[in-house]
Image (cartoon, grey):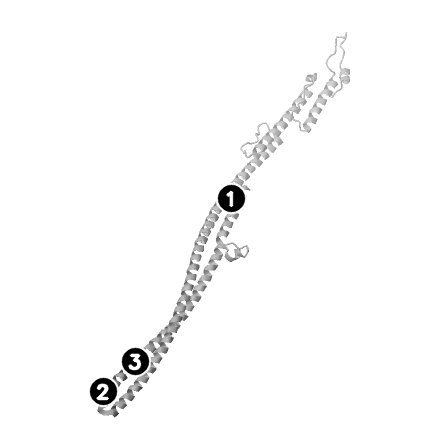
């Protein structure tokens, strides 16, 4: 700025002491240049509100007037460029990509830069649309994954429940069958013992029948020796002999039947033992299934081994947590 003293020195006194006249030309130039320098410094500091003010006496200097107008016009365009760029970019940052940089009144490099901003805005709009599409696809896939996994988890849980119930029922039936097989084995054993006792009794009867036949034969011989007196005794001896023969034949049949019963009992015992082993295997398998369903002995032993139902619930919780993070990202 021009100091007050220099300003006063630049003033001329009219003849007769009538007062000061207009500043001298070089003083006006200095004041105009100082004003322009002030505005340029403010603009360089980022203040585009300042404008070059009118300097009294400069209206007679066309070059100063034009310089002031052009400098102010340049600052106007810079201010408009900065404001328009800020408005366009701020709108884009808020997702309002329709807000274009208005090119009207932007010549040369201003227009080129504004066009570059518009191209960047269009590219940002495309990227945002693509990101939104990807986001929608991600959410749709997340929903589909959640539905599928939840359905599988529910099916596994339901199947585990049914399997557990079936395994428990099978184990109970197997246990009952084992007890019944043991009882049947004991009954067959008792039947075999009874058949053996019957065999012993039949053997005794056969021995008695044999002795009776021998006695009847002796009686027949003695009655023949006695002649007429022993005829009646001979008849009795003959009947006793026939009875002994019939008893021996019946005893033989009983022996054969008892042997058949004992053979069948032995085979039945073997079959029952085989059935018992099979049922015990079924019981062990049912227990293994039950353990797989609910963790069984592993859980009781403190081992971190989940059953199917627990695994299904754990899977459902983990997928739900993952999808919550996915939807929030």
Work out whether residue 53 or residue 183 is closer to the camera in this orientation and state it: 183
Q: Name the residue under label 3.
A: 247
Q: In this view, does 190 lie to the left or right of 110?
A: left
Above or below for 297 versus 240 = above
Q: Mark 2 points at which residue?
A: 232
Query: Dividing the picture into quarters, in which one does residue 87 lie?
Result: top right
Q: In this view, does 38 lie to the left or right of 182?
A: right
Q: Disc 2, disc 3: CB below 8 Å?
A: no
Q: Where is residue 4 in the image (x, y as percent from the top left)?
A: 76, 17
* One can see residue 38 in this view: yes
How many labels, in total? 3
Task: Report the disc number at residue 158.
Answer: none
How far is disc 2 from disc 1 in space, using C-alphas? 120 Å
Work out whether residue 128 or residue 173 is closer to the camera in this orientation and state it: 173
Q: Where is residue 111 in the image (x, y as percent from the top left)?
A: 60, 31
Mark 2 Cα within 10 Å, few/some/many (few <14, many 20+)?
few
């Amino acid at each position: 700025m021009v100091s007050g003293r220099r300003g006063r020195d630049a003033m001329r006194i009219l003849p007769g002491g009538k007062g000061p006249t207009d500043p001298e030309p070089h003083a006006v130039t200095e004041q105009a240049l100082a004003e322009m320098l002030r505005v340029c410094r403010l603009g360089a500091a980022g203040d585009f509100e300042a404008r070059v003010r009118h300097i009294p006496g400069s209206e007679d200097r066309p070059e100063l007037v034009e310089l002031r107008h052009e400098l102010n016009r340049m600052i106007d365009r810079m201010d408009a460029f900065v404001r328009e760029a800020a408005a366009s970019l701020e709108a884009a940052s808020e997702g309002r990509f329709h807000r274009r940089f208005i090119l009207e009144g932007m010549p040369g490099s201003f227009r080129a830069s504004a066009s570059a901003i518009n191209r960047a805005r269009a590219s940002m709009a495309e990227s945002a649309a693509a990101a939104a599409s990807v986001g929608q696809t991600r959410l749709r896939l997340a929903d589909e994954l959640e539905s599928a996994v939840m359905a599988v988890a529910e099916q596994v849980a339901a199947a585990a429940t049914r399997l557990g119930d079936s395994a428990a029922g099978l184990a109970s039936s197997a246990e009952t069958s084992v007890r019944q097989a043991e009882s049947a084995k004991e009954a067959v054993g008792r039947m075999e013992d009874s058949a053996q006792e019957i065999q012993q009794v039949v053997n005794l009867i056969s021995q008695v029948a044999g002795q009776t036949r021998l006695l009847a034969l002796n009686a027949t011989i003695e009655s023949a020796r006695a002649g007429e007196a022993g005829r009646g005794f001979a008849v009795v001896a003959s009947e006793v002999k026939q009875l002994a023969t019939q008893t021996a034949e019946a005893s033989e049949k009983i022996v054969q039947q008892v042997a058949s019963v004992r053979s069948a009992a032995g085979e039945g015992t073997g079959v029952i033992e085989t059935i018992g082993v099979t049922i015990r295997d079924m019981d062990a398998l049912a227990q293994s299934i039950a353990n797989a369903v609910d963790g069984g002995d592993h859980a009781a032993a403190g081992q971190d081994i989940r059953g199917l139902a627990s695994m299904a619930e754990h899977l459902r919780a983990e997928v739900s947590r993952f999808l919550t993070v996915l939807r929030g990202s």
